[in-house]
Structure formats: C-alpha cells, structure tokens
Image (cartoon, coloured by chain):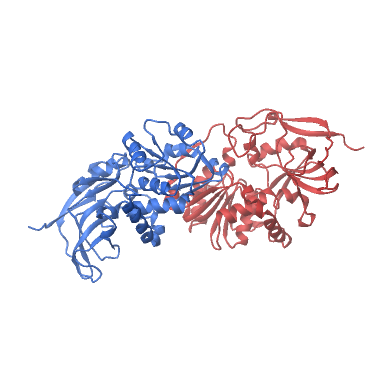
Chain colours: A red, B blue
Amino acid sequence: MPATVNREIVLASRPDEIPSESDFRAVESPIPSPSEGEVLVRTMWLSLDPYMRGRIRDAPSYSPPVQIGEVMVGGIVGEVIESRTPAFQAGDIVNGSLGWREYATSDGSDLRKVDRGLGPLSTALGVLGMPGMTAYFGLLDVGQPEPGDTVVVSAASGAVGQVVGQIARIMGCKVVGIAGTAQKVDYVINDLGFDYGINYKTEDVNSALSNLCPEGVDVYFDNVGGHITDAVMEHINTGARISVCGQISQYNLAEPEMAPRNMRLLITNQAKMEGFLVGKFAGNFEHARERMAGWIKSGTLRYREDVVEGIENAPRAFIGMMSGENFGKLLVKVSEE
Amino acid sequence: MPATVNREIVLASRPDEIPSESDFRAVESPIPSPSEGEVLVRTMWLSLDPYMRGRIRDAPSYSPPVQIGEVMVGGIVGEVIESRTPAFQAGDIVNGSLGWREYATSDGSDLRKVDRGLGPLSTALGVLGMPGMTAYFGLLDVGQPEPGDTVVVSAASGAVGQVVGQIARIMGCKVVGIAGTAQKVDYVINDLGFDYGINYKTEDVNSALSNLCPEGVDVYFDNVGGHITDAVMEHINTGARISVCGQISQYNLAEPEMAPRNMRLLITNQAKMEGFLVGKFAGNFEHARERMAGWIKSGTLRYREDVVEGIENAPRAFIGMMSGENFGKLLVKVSEE
C-alpha cells in the first residue's frame, strides 16, 4: 500500500540557547499533489548542518529565519515520483532545499539533477554537496594554500573539516586537525592522512600548536570560532589567511561571548580574515564536483557519514551536532533509495 | 658658536598602561662624529606616530622592542651636515628612522633623499611619508574602494585618517569620518570635503551610522579598534573590506579588553578583514608619492600638521596623541630648516 501520509518537522518555538526537542514538532498531512509545472519529490536523504542554527534565530542574517510553525529548512536528495513539468521525469534523482519532510512539491527552480555516476546518492549532500563545496572553495579560494604551507582546520572530522584537511594534503600542505574526541583525532590522522590532530577537550590547543607547528600557521580554516580560534590566532604567520566558515561554538549563545580583543594580531602578522558563504562560488560547483568525484574514485579523498534513520529523529540528531556528538557528515535517512 | 651637545630621548622605563613623562629621559652627549662610510645628520623634524607605543611594549611583534636606556625609535627629516660616504653630500635632505635625537650618524642604508620639489620638508613625515603611504595603500590596495562605495575612517583627522578620507573622496566614494572633537569633525567635513563626520565622544556611533549610511558600509579603514570598530561592523555590507591599520584604543591597555565576539558578521556579510604594515608596499612608494604630490599641488589633497617645538617636548606630545590631543599629523620641530 503506497504511503499517503507526509511527515514534516516544523519549528515549534524559537530557542534562545541550546535547542531542545520540544522546539520542534512532527506534523502529519496528506502527501501533496504537484500542480501544473511542479514535481513531487520523495526524500531519501536529509542533510543536517550547523547553518540551520542560524536560520532559527530571529536576527538579521543572509536569509530570513524559519518562522514558528514552518517546516525546517534543509537540503535533501530524493526521487521525483511524479512530474508535471518537462524539466523532470519520474525517477530523476534531485538535490534541493526542500526541508525536513518526507515529501515535497517544487517548481524545480531550486532542484539540481544528481548524476548517479559520481558516487553514492548521499554524497550529493556531503562531500559532493554543499559541505564539500564549502570546503573546496573556502580552502582554495579564500584560504589560498600553497604547497608547504601549514594548514589548521577545526571541527576536523565534520562534514566540511574532513574535506578541507584532505584537499590541503592533496595540495602538499602540512595539515593539523582539531577535533573533540580521541576517536576523531585518530580518524583524521590514520584514515584521512592529516599530519597531526589535537583533541581540544583534553589538550591545550595553544601549547599543542607550539609543539606541532613551530613554523607557525599559514592557513586556518575556522569552523568553530571561540577559544579554539583565539588559540590558533596566536600562531599565525606573516601573511596568514583565516577562512571563516562557521562559528559553531557561538551559535547556541543568547548573548555574544566576551573575549579578549586580538585584532592587533592581524596587523602585526599582516594577516587576512575572510568570511564567506558557499553560494558565492556556485558558478564553479560543477567543475569542483567533477574534480572531487575523481579524487574519491581514485581513493585520494575519503569521507565519513553519520547516518540517523527516520525524519522523526532529525531534531535530536541536529541538537547533538551542536555539541559535536556526530562523527562525520550528519545525514538522516528518510526513506530507502 | 656651533652646537656641541646632542640631546636624545631614551626609554627610561616600560609603561604597563598609559605612558608618563617619567618613562622617558633626556640625555646629553657630544655630537657624534661620522666614521668612514657614514654621514652625520642634524634632525629638523621628528615624527610622532601611534606605532611607537607598540615598540615600547615587551611583546612579540614585527620588530623587537626599544630596550630600557635606548633612544626612542622615530622617523625624522634632517640635513646631512657631514658626509664620509659618496652616497650623500653635506646639504642633502634625508628621511630615515634615526630616533628621538638632535643629531645622529648613519651608514645611509636606511636614509632616503627627500626631493624638496615635492612639498615642504615636513610632508616627508606626513602626507608624503609613512602615514601618507599607509593611507594610500591601506585604502586602495587593502580596502579596494570603488566609486560610489561608502567608506568610513576612524581617527579621521589624524595623520593617516585625513589622507584616507580625501583619497576616498577623490575615488568618488561617500566618506564618513569618525573623530573625537567637534572641531575635528568640522575640519574633515568643511576643510577636507568628507561627506559626514561623527564625534564618537558625544554621539552614539551605531545610531549615527544608521542615520548617515542607511545603504551600509563598503570599506572601513580602522585606525582605532575597540568599541568604535564594533559599531562600524554592525553596518558592513555584503563583500565589505575592513582595512586594519591601527588599534590605538587598545595600545595603552596592560591586558586585552574584553569584547563581544562578532566574527559571525564576517560570515553573514562575506566580508574581509585584513591587517597590514605599510612596508609591504615599499616598492610602490615612489609612484604613490608623486601622485599625491600632484594632488597637493592642485589643491585636491590637503593636510594638517600639529607641531610641537623642541625634542624635550616629544614625550608629552606622544603621550597626548594616545588620547587624541593632537589635531593633525603630530611633528616635533627639532631644529630650524
């Protein structure tokens, strides 16, 4: 019997600090019918990403926030199961931002067909998707590493960090990853080929960098902000580039954390700190995706996924991600491929 | 009777916070004789600049600190009164970093001949010297303004700020200067042609920027850091460039000031913050100097100097500069031209 119910996760209340499961609510509705010009998509994979924390905060940002009662935003990979537009056919695999739900209609303007030949479908949300593009362009275009440079990346085993470190390795850089468990540190060194790892929960990052990088840091890819970033800043070299991708340490704070001002370090080291959103590089995604798919096929680029089953478990997994409970790219398997 | 005594100002003690006059000491010694290969220079003008505060702090920086008992560092313009090297002749006017003293010898490696035709000799320490070069390259190369951009500059009537704002005006930008007295604000608007000014001691910078720049800020040239910079950051546009030249608000603090973290603003606005030292652009100084001398001659670029007489008054003037007591480029007239 085909499914008739569409389960969706909506924002129930706006958390000031750490979100709780009660800030989200599962609702059921009939599976929608596509109008003329639309497709109906069955979600297979939902991506959970740190940026979503910003999207449920009612503060000025690059996009308006999710409203109370609205479906949570999120990227998905799914199958077109009904099409009323010539642009798509039933059976097409698509990637788009259709939210935390099992079925969605779309006019297709925000959908991209996924090439099954590039890799497993879930990679369209990870290493070959938004996080992978973020790593690729945030490292290469913003960080501008050169062979022999020392590159430090925080949240090193996460969806973005794991790719950043490996591309830096491919570029001929010395790579240091910062992560929050011994298992994650072991993984980035032994599975991904980083040169060194630092467990920020058990080691002093500043001292560890003194030991591991006596030559200083040329590129810092910042996913976390906060005290970890303060520590890395003490080690930057002349002309260093800090690629500011995320600040996950700050996202659950109702008020900004107070910290010692350290902008003089930018002057004395003639260093650059640049924030970016991956959409800036959208015109070059296809080229990057093909290049990275080639690295995956040759075994040069690896990736790790952390899969949770069932849309109903998305809130708990998302909340856990904010404190580093995931290990690798966090995905919700919403339905079978 | 020709002078025989050389008066010098040495660092007497290392201030933790606001320097006092007792941190400096005047010492007298015979006027030195140049050795073979050296010149003897009589200082006419001594430049006092904010960077000197960093040079008397015993902390890692781009140069080693002045040691206790050593002559204070500083740029001068003077006359070669005796030469034992073919590279210079008596009567040459030179610019170099010979320190807070009336006479100095030099092997000439750090001296530059000053072209009297470019302007008054004191300009070699101001608008056509290090502060002018700092303004020119820090704005054009680091800030990268485009016609129509909104440019905000702090310490707007100072040696660097006054030049930054005028070059931005020449570039066709809308210019807002931030300064600490009504007189300074009046000066940058009515004498230098800035569009607007904000008195940070009597106005709320954040509100003032909301009123004056509803279109947002594209380039911020930061001479001061601290709360003023925090306020400007709330107004940056997508793709904004923050050229970090100085942090004078922080230089007299024994411990870094605590402030709310705001790096997320770099991400959401895809903005770049870059620190620089003017020496990076030394290869292009001559071109910039000629261009700026042309603007001065045509009346397009103006400058204001704040002149103190006598080397013995350098410490008091320097200390006053840290709290904005000077009005324009601060110079000590050490001897007649």
Name the residue at the right extreme: A1
Q: Answer yes or no: is residue B90 visible.
A: yes
Residue most extreme to the left: B1
Out of A96 and A214, give the one closest to the viewer: A96
Point out residue A89 in the picture as x, y percentages from the top left corner: 84, 48
Q: Please state, as top left, top right, bottom left or bottom right, where the N terminus of chain A lies in the image.
A: top right
Numbered label tally: 0
Classify B303 as above or below A56.
below
Left or right placement of residue B129 versus residue A135 in this view: left
Relative horizontal placement of residue B71, taking residue B273 as reference (left or right):
left
Residue A304: horizontal and vertical position, in percent?
70, 51
Q: Residue at x 82, y 49 (%)?
A: A92
Q: Quadrant of residue A43?
A: top right
Position of residue B97 measured from the top left corner of the image (x, y, whole percent): 28, 57
Q: Nearer the viewer, residue B132 or A9?
A: B132
Question: Residue A325, percent across and down?
Answer: 66, 41
Q: Is residue B232 above or below residue B26?
A: above
Q: Is residue B327 above or below residue B335?
A: above
User: Foreground: B96 or A202?
Assistant: B96
Residue A187 visible within the image: no
